[in-house]
């Protein structure tokens, strides 16, 4: 397994980096332990239809870092038959499985790829993965670092993204530059920066028209205890995105520190690439100076989401403390809080299947959710990945649940 994936899942004990890795499919989908959670124990239910979509036995059969971007930019409008959703993944495994297992050396791991879903329903025939191949026909990563600050050997894990329909409909995706560093310890990697990938309207995979920009959104905390990495989640609070009480700003969330603090920056859509125009929440007001940025919550995960609720409220969805086995939500009355204490809405039973299994990176998908509920996913991985994936090809696929609102 790629070191990055492990690092994010263990962020509680380590650096404020990104998170873990991937999943699979073979044979017929079996009812998982989640189904045993009654309504009395959980506000959520297992989303069998979405889990089946990602339960695959050929091609892509696992990947982490899943985000879903409506390509029409309508983040908070229910998807329809014409909606196209771009799913972006970080470390992913590609190959063939048989009877729930995979042969040693029978798969290839790449650092990122995408998939496109046509329509609103999780139908396999309308869901297609995209990744490039090298001259030998082997899968390769879709996005490779090409910015001026990029150093040899670096690669990308992907953050959140959105379509900036209030400007020129550019598709933006945050991308974390990461490099392997042979330290002799368990965490032989480090994050080098945060890039922004800009893809023109109408582009299709492999997105050859892309531009890549270095950003200033990876910097030390004021107290020096870690580095903030922005791009963990994006909230487009605009009328065009379908936000119910829009203020016209794009909010971008970052995570950092031993306590996994949540930090917020914002900008107007037309200034998204003008990084000097961004503002940072300092706990009392918005300021141009990033050094005064203050945490609005803690014990979150390196990937998360903010969704509008009826009545002017907002719902923050995340994995409790990065990798604890609970999906949690927090309610607030503004995109910067104050946030009510976290409420656990799902126990992730996969951690009880193997001593090495862990979970991480819960987030919600408003435009793919039915009225009165919220579709949520989380990732599953193993600290002994290269052994466990051989016997459990379904290990690293994302799991989906539905939260009653």
Image: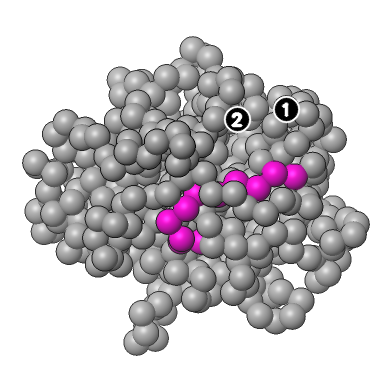
Prevailing SS of the magenta stretch: strand
Q: Is residue 51 magenta?
A: no
Q: Residue at x 50, y 69 (%)?
A: 11
Measuring from the top left, give residue 90's x and y in whole percent. 42, 52
Q: Quadrant of residue 314?
A: top right
Provide the residue span drawn in magenta. 322-332
Is residue 88 placed above or below 276 in the rendered structure? above
Residue carrying label 2: 405
Q: Residue at x 42, y 19 (%)?
A: 121
Q: Is residue 357 visible?
A: yes
Q: CA distance from mark 1 to mark 2?
A: 9 Å
**Label 2: few (<14), some (14–19) or many (≥20) C-alpha neighbours in 10 Å:** few
Q: Residue at x 53, y 21 (%)?
A: 370
Element carrying mark 2: loop
Is 114 on the left-hand or right-hand side of 329? left
Query: Where residue 237 is drawn, which disc sits there?
Result: none
């Amino acid at each position: 397994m790629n070191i990055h994936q492990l690092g994010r899942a263990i962020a509680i004990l380590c650096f404020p980096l990104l998170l873990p890795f991937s999943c699979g499919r073979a044979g017929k989908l079996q009812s998982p332990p989640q189904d045993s959670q009654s309504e009395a124990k959980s506000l959520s239910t297992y989303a069998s239809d979405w889990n089946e979509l990602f339960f695959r036995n050929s091609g892509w059969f696992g990947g982490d870092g899943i985000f879903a971007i409506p390509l029409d930019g309508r983040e908070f409008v229910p998807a329809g038959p014409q909606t196209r959703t771009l799913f972006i993944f970080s470390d992913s495994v590609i190959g063939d499985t048989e009877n729930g297992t995979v042969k040693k050396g029978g798969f290839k791991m790449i650092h990122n790829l995408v998939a496109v879903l046509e329509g609103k329903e999780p139908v396999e025939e309308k869901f297609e993965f995209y990744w490039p191949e090298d001259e030998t026909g082997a899968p390769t990563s879709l996005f490779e670092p090409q910015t001026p600050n990029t150093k040899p050997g670096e690669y990308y894990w992907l953050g959140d993204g959105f379509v900036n329909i209030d400007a020129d409909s550019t598709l933006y995706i945050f991308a974390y530059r990461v490099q392997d560093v042979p330290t002799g310890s368990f965490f032989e990697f480090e994050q080098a920066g945060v890039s922004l990938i800009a893809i023109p309207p109408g582009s299709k995979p492999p997105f050859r028209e892309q531009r890549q920009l270095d950003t200033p959104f990876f910097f030390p905390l004021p107290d020096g205890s870690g580095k903030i990495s922005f791009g963990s989640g994006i909230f487009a609070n605009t009328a065009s995105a379908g936000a119910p009480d829009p203020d016209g700003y794009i909010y971008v969330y970052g995570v950092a520190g031993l306590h996994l603090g949540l930090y917020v920056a914002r900008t107007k859509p037309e200034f998204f690439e003008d990084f000097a125009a961004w503002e940072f929440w300092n706990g009392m007001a918005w300021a141009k100076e990033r050094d005064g940025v203050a945490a609005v919550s803690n014990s979150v995960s390196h990937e998360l989401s903010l969704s509008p609720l009826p009545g002017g409220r907002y719902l923050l969805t995340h994995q409790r403390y990065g990798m604890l086995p609970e999906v949690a939500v927090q309610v607030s009355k503004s995109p910067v809080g104050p946030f009510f204490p976290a409420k656990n809405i799902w126990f992730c039973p996969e951690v009880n299947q193997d001593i090495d299994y862990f979970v991480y990176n819960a987030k919600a998908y408003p435009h793919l959710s039915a009225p009165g509920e919220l579709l949520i996913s989380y990732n599953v991985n193993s600290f002994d990945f290269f052994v466990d994936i051989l016997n459990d090809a379904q290990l690293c696929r994302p799991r989906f649940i539905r939260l009653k609102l």
